[in-house]
Amino acid sequence: MKMDVLLGLQWGDEGKGKVVDVLAPQYDVVARFQGGPNAGHTLEFDGIKHVLHQIPSGIFRSNLTNIIGNGVVLDPVVLRKEIEGLKKFNIDFNKNLFISKKATIIIPTHKLLDAAYEKSKGDKKIGSTLKGIGPTYQDKIGRVALRVGDILAEDFEDKYNALVERHKTTLSFYNFPLEELPELEKVFFDSVEFFKTLNLVDSEYQVNDHLVKGDRILAEGAQGSLLDIDFGSYPFVTSSSTMAAGACTGLGVSPSKIGEVYGIFKAYCTRVGSGPFPTELFDQDGEDMRKEGNEFGSTTGRPRRCGWIDLPALKYSIMINGVTQLFMMKGDVLNIFEEIKICTHYELPDGTRVDKLTYEHNDQNVKPIYRTVKGWNQSLQGVTNYDGFPQELKDYVTILEEELQVPIKMVSIGPDRNQTILR
């Protein structure tokens, strides 16, 4: 049996949580492989909206095993709040949730470092969520971080204090205040005690044992491919590998065990924070798109930047991930437009037209070249199958399929589970 991977192809916020929830009945295991509480996965069903930050999106399916892999950075405080917030749904976390002992822990001073680094950048800030993600991954790569398994060791507090002293040295350089640290630490250590009651495992063995048994596994990514630490719009990226290869390193699975790669994209584009965004709209269309799509961060509440779909960027993400199936999300947001634009190429400052996302795009102002198509300009409320789509929406899907050369197998036309149309 092979592990399927589900990931975003744009700058995050594509709707991965909803798709995991829809696909979950086909799987035995949902495993999160990277990111941390900077990612918010939104699911909506039975008229209730749920936002998950660290827990895999299969948690609402009682028959599924949910695994938080070694590639994730975990905040014990956030995880405890998440679990306590979900208690009303009678989820058996002792049965359904397993956490890798090799996952890295976010400690209070990581958040202070995050704020200090971002403040020091001034006008050149990258738009961090200030959740401590970057500094935690820095410590992981620097080989000084704490991992989940460390909380079980007798000398955990010694290890913790040694790391905090390192952080304090850096924070003093930035003249960053530490007044709130004692209270943050109290909540942190309370949460660590709660953490010890959960299933802490060697998850790489668990994942591979499931594959040997023939169980179906869905690996769930956070953020989007264009925020990947290597292949995203650096330095305006996240600190982990958000692409399909990250599922291998983030869960301990061989590349030969990867099956389907599901790529999720919005029918348009959004981005939170700073960084290049060639098709960004600064006019009324962009504002209307934001309002219609309720484009505000599920973790931060920040308004998202909005723009038309960007095919060169999508083709790039499809290539580096080996995408086998595409899922188009939030098609209903384009209901309000009489005309819809599709970016097919970029025009470089020297007048050259290209359809590739190259290194220079991070520093150059590229002009999007658009193809304009007719919009459907009507509500999709009540539509339950693809045949019920307006012809203009079918045409839009066909154009994208022809350009991207990968089948679009699902079109989402609303936030609820039942507003997901399979083709």
Image (cartoon, helix red, strand yellow):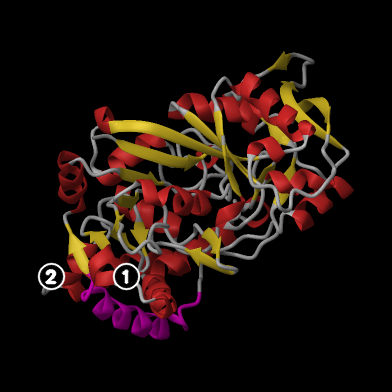
Would residue 199 appear left or right of 170 to someone viewing this image?
left
Farthest left residue? 154
Q: Earlier in the sequence, mark 2 or mark 1?
A: 2
Q: Which residue is mark 2?
A: 153
Instruction: Indicate the position of residue 364 as horizontal and vertical percent values.
Output: 70, 29
Residue 366: quarter of image: top right
The Cα–Cα distance between marks 2 and 1, rounded to whole angstroms, is 17 Å
Q: Is residue 369 magenta?
A: no
Range covered by the magenta-colored residues = 177-198
Work out which quarter of the rendered image holds the N terminus and state it.
Answer: top left
Amino acid type, callout 2: Ala
Name the residue located 59 percent from the left edge and 64 percent from the top edge. 300
* Label tally: 2
Q: Is residue 192 magenta?
A: yes
Amino acid type, callout 1: Val
Q: Which residue is mark 1?
A: 164
Q: Nearer the viewer, residue 26 or 193?
A: 26
Would residue 315 appear left or right of 154 to someone viewing this image?
right
**Few, some or many residues within 10 Å of mark 2 (<14, 14–19, 20+):** few
**Few, some or many residues within 10 Å of mark 1 (<14, 14–19, 20+):** some
| Mark 1, secondary structure of its residue | helix
